[in-house]
Image: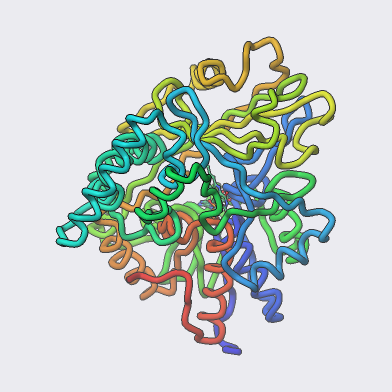
Amino acid sequence: MRKDIGKIIILGAGPTGLGAAYRLKELGYDDFIVLERENHIGGLSASFEDRKGFTWDIGGHIQFSHYRYFDRVMEKCLNREDWLQHKRDSWIWMKKRFIPYPFQNNIRYLPNEDTWKCIKGLIEASKKGMRGGKVRNFREWMFHVFGKGIAEEFMVPYNRKVWAHPLGQMSYRWIGDRVSVVDLNKVVEKVVMGKDDIQWGPNSTFKFPIKGGTGAIWKNTGELIGENKFRTRSEVRRVDPVKKELFLAGNKKIDYDVLLNTGPLDKFAGMVDNFPPALRKKAKTLKYSSVNVVGIGLKGKPRDELKKKCWMYFPESDCPFYRVTVFSNYSPNNVPDSKLYWSLMAETSESKYKPVSKDRIVKDTIDGFKATGLIENKSGIVSKWSYRASYAYPVPSLERDGILKDVILRLEKSELYSRGRFGGWKYEMGNQDHSFMQGVEWVDRVVSGKKEKTYSLK
Ligand SMILES: Cc1cc2nc3c(=O)[nH]c(=O)nc-3n(C[C@H](O)[C@H](O)[C@H](O)COP(=O)(O)OP(=O)(O)OC[C@H]3O[C@@H](n4cnc5c(N)ncnc54)[C@H](O)[C@@H]3O)c2cc1C
């Protein structure tokens, strides 16, 4: 172990900061502290209980993993019996019907003329694919890979709704296992044989805590690290990388030797004294979207069609949200009494391209529930909860990778590091498991010189 690093300050107690703190504790390195702006830990993965006793996440969070190390920590932070295991049951609501997810593998559910439009597009795309062709952005990638039918029917409207940014301004290089690409033979086989294909992807099974929502995971991880390692209500406002001092709101000064930021990189670059103005300006051009989460607690039971569903996607314009989770299906403890209540949680994206009225979002969401048949009327509503995450989705814009390289490498020259969903600004490595492991691997890098695997500036 390197002995000379001195005092490590971790800015932010979301999964990334917790990953770093957990690893330091595991290595027996005690000279560190986590500073958190809010009065709780968990970041975007925190949960809240409303006044009526309904539990809510900041949008539907599910637990799945790409790492054995992460799995082992999850096993330590909740006992086996405190995890519920789920099989994904997710759907797309469009054309007044539910279509199993992923859309492209289940187009037989569409009206015949639309199914044919999708197949024709796929055939044309596969012919063009053989001839090559230059794809410049996410929008073009969708047409190139899926063809006109699937792109126009689902991919473009859904992605426009979720990202809240023009798709032509987005890169497609982040996709990896985030979007199910398509196999023409398989698609046609499913249509002709009348079969569903719902197994795709790394989250086809997932876990959820029996009590306390997703936030319970991170509260317990915090307890494993030790309460004395966290200072909540401690917002970092300024960093002097020469004197190695940082300043909290109220101007309280704290010395450090190495600093890990896990909050939004654009804001962090603006806090560092004498950071080159051109780079500060570049960091400000990183794109992101916000999410408005609305949780609605309801009396009674969901109708039969919703009884097993996990989440549903909504590409059409009859509702503001892009996704709704039947949150009471994740755990009976997400509602005050599962015999009497159930719950729905909706996510609506927002950006300068897609403004959302703060005053109307709850009403618009409820109207959307009615318009899409999720509820019949408002009489069953017993609780309304809402939360706006201003930084929710780090948008993989065309310029992103160049900006990140310049800004992050310059910060590292001053022993300032930035990792995590918005600290590292890479959506494709921005889930809970990735974020936690970014923190773990960052510690292994600064403490023992190991190469980080999850976060890269390629
Ligand atoms: C709608 C939605 C749905 C999601 N669904 C899933 C899912 O199903 N599965 C999954 O694995 N992941 C999901 N995620 C991603 C998950 O929320 C993130 O992976 C995770 O929370 C990122 O952790 P982080 O620590 O990098 O960042 P954050 O969670 O954003 O934590 C950063 C922390 O830093 C603090 N902070 C910021 N600035 C300062 C400052 N100046 N001083 C002190 N503290 C500061 C913040 O208050 C926050 O607590 C979802 C995210 C969203 C928005």
- Is 109 or 234 nearer to us in this picture? 109
Viewport quadrant of the C terminus: bottom left
Q: Residue furthest front?
A: 193
- Where is residue 369? Give x, y as percent: 56, 20
Q: Relative to residue 6, is residue 340 drawn left or right?
A: right
Task: In the rendered view, tell whether residue 11 sits above or below residue 341.
Answer: below
- Where is residue 15? Give x, y as percent: 60, 58
| Colouring scheme applied when the structure was drawn | rainbow
- Where is residue 129? Give x, y as percent: 21, 58
- Is 71 or 417 nearer to us in this picture? 71
Q: Is residue 414 visible?
A: yes
Total residue callouts? 0
- Is 455 or 254 nearer to us in this picture? 455
- Where is residue 185? Give x, y as percent: 37, 55
Task: In the rendered view, tell whether residue 309 sits above or below residue 417.
Answer: above
Viewport quadrant of the N terminus: bottom right
Residue drawn at the location 75% of the way across and 36% of the way down: 334
Residue drawn at the location 41% of the way across and 33% of the way down: 350
- Is 427 or 115 nearer to us in this picture? 115
Residue drawn at the location 63% of the way across and 62% of the way down: 18
Q: Quadrant of residue 330?
A: top right
Q: Relative to residue 452, is residue 299 drawn left or right?
A: right
Task: In the rendered view, tell whether residue 370 sits above or below residue 191.
Answer: above
Q: Quadrant of residue 275?
A: bottom left
Q: Relative to residue 355, is residue 209 drawn left or right?
A: right
Residue drawn at the location 31% of the way across and 67% of the way down: 405
Task: In the rendered view, tell whether residue 162 sits above or below residue 354.
Answer: below
Q: Is residue 35 visible?
A: no
